[in-house]
Amino acid sequence: MEKLSCCIFINLILSGIFTLLSLSFSADISLAAFPVSLCFSVLLFYFAFFRLIKKQDISKIFTVRRFFQYEPFVYITSFVLQRAGIKEVPFAVDVISALVWIGVTVMSFVILHFLSEKRVFAFSPAWKEYHEKNHQEKPSGIKRIFVEIFEWVDALIQAVFTIILLNIFFFQLYEIPSESMVPAFLVKDRVVVFKTLAGPKFPLSQAGIPYIQNYDRGDIVVFRNPHYSNDRKSEVKTFMSQFLYMCSLTLIKTNTDENGELKADPLVKRITGVPGEQLMLVDGILYARTKDNPEFKKVEEDSLWAAWDLNALDSKTKSRIRDFPFYKDEFQNVLDVEEARRSLDLVKAFEECEQLAQKVRPYASGKDLREESSVIHFIYPGDYYEFSLFNNAEILKEKILYNDGGAQWFDSFMTNWAYQVAAEVFPEKDKASLSAQDVKDALKTFQCNGNAQGNSLVGGNLYDDSCFRLNVMTKIVFGKLILRNIQLDEEQVPFASRNSDEVRKDCYEEAQLLCDYILRLDQRNMSIFPPNNENNCAVYIPEDNYFMMGDNRYNSLDMRHSYEQKLIKLTPYDDFSVKYSSNLAPQYVSKKSILGKASFRFWPFDRIGFTSKIKSE
């Protein structure tokens, strides 16, 4: 009896402390936390201490047992209510409240152990005698129906709260919503995420279990989406939606953004960059360097899980995939564009651009503009968009031929890239004084040699160099198309017959391949990240931060991207650069945002397995 009395007394003290910590003075929902805790604590004191211990009223054992069963759930509810208000609760209060809740929970388990039917009546001969004389028979009739209903409701409520606590601190179930992780995960796959080692936090607070787990490249993790706001209002909404999501075993989803669309939160991705690295993605190959190894090297293991051509997967997996970025054999077009770009001879490209400009100029009737700085604005900024260049080729041809500055703009558009790079190589010379031979001599130094960085690459790295060359390739095709359209005018070829012209058809086929590639440029390539500082010195992913990508790289909106598109230049090394629509905005994710590893896939049954063994073929 003394043990039971002592445990109940300690529990009541902790309950009182927790109730005092639940005080709030904000005029919002947080005011409800204190009354909830106070009412429960008063009732707990009355039945557990006053009636059971002091009055020895053995008839209240069932009631007392129910109170201690619900105690952790009531107080965690109070904890959440207090933090659902507008004002943030001090971290110290969070920590103390969390520790007190743990103490209350432990003591309630101990008390329930003592109050079990096998043990409680052995505390006192009087209790045992009362139990034997007042042994209750099972109710019957309508009373039995109400008792059964009560027991079912009671069991359901306890099950729901138990699931919530398990989901917060131990493990959580997730349903895969998209195909960003094909073939490791398919849509509707369900996975278990173990959270205890990942430093789970008490709801709406920063108090929780310390971080124990570390992560390696290749780990599949679940984490909070950093693209969304994490203010208190959105965090409360997210918690409530996750509450329903967990209670419904991943069936009900209510976490929506301001537009009413379901949030992609949390995310399931693979860690591809770790602390201390600087990354770069070119032609689907991930490169990394560190402070100790400053040369960019291929991350060989990334090819084990990066899926670029879904058509190469086995037939069983393909039958469950909804969206294929490419039709069968179309991925070869991507490889062909990249090979052509790598093998591009910049000197020959410059000569071709010069020849195109010289051939077009005699047909132009407009005068040159006096202000050279205004030449770049000869066409609208949006017209530099790669799709617009080819789609509006006929309109642009007319402007080049008949507007002042037309030939001047076309010449600059076709050759400025070469002079601008040459000025970087020969800084002692003024750009306007550079001869064609100077430009050729400068361009000879820029030849791909298989390295990911160095003076032989425009911009000093493979990404900048590849985008620069892609810009040149696009200009050459555009220049050939403009020239051919002019020639067809001169030959008075009917407009309806021009689509059958072989040269024109070849130009549009090349343009289509380039436009298709550039459209997906940000899925296949990523600039140096984190970017170098203003002194062009390398910056690395900080400690306790990670970079994530989906396995299905062409169908993954991940840490490479933002949710907004913007029109940007293909290269900064050309004032007249072609533009494309980009959402490239890489960012790393703090370990604090990682909820745990997606450790085990439990549905569907024919795909059950541990994710540590799941890799792309």
Image: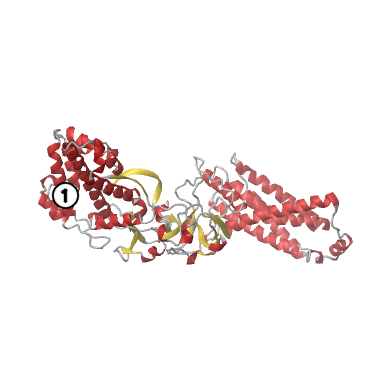
Q: What residue is rendered at 40% in x and 65% in y?
A: 304
- Front residue (pair 320, 446): 320
- Front residue (pair 478, 420): 478
Q: What residue is rendered at 42% in x and 56% in y?
A: 552
How many residues crowd mark 1 within 10 Å: few (<14), some (14–19), many (20+)? Answer: some
Q: Secondary structure at mark 1?
A: helix
Where residue 537 appears, x then y in whole percent? 28, 57
- Front residue (pair 149, 471): 471
The colouring scheme, among rainbow, by chain, secondary structure or one colour, is secondary structure
* Residue 239 placement, left or right of 344: right
- The answer to whether any part of residue 543 appears in the image is no
Up the image or down, 433 lies above or below 379; here it is below
* Residue 308 placement, left or right of 343: right
* Residue 294 placement, left or right of 595: left
Q: What residue is rendered at 83% in x and 56% in y?
A: 59
Question: Where's the N terminus, which quadrant?
Answer: bottom right
Where residue 74 appears, x then y in whole percent? 67, 51
Q: Which residue is mark 1?
A: 352
Where residue 117 appears, x then y in whole percent? 79, 63
Where residue 31 appears, x then y in whole percent? 62, 42
Q: How many marks?
A: 1
Question: Where's the C terminus, which quadrant?
Answer: bottom left
Q: Amino acid at mark 1?
A: Glu
Up the image or down, 382 lies above or below 420; here it is above
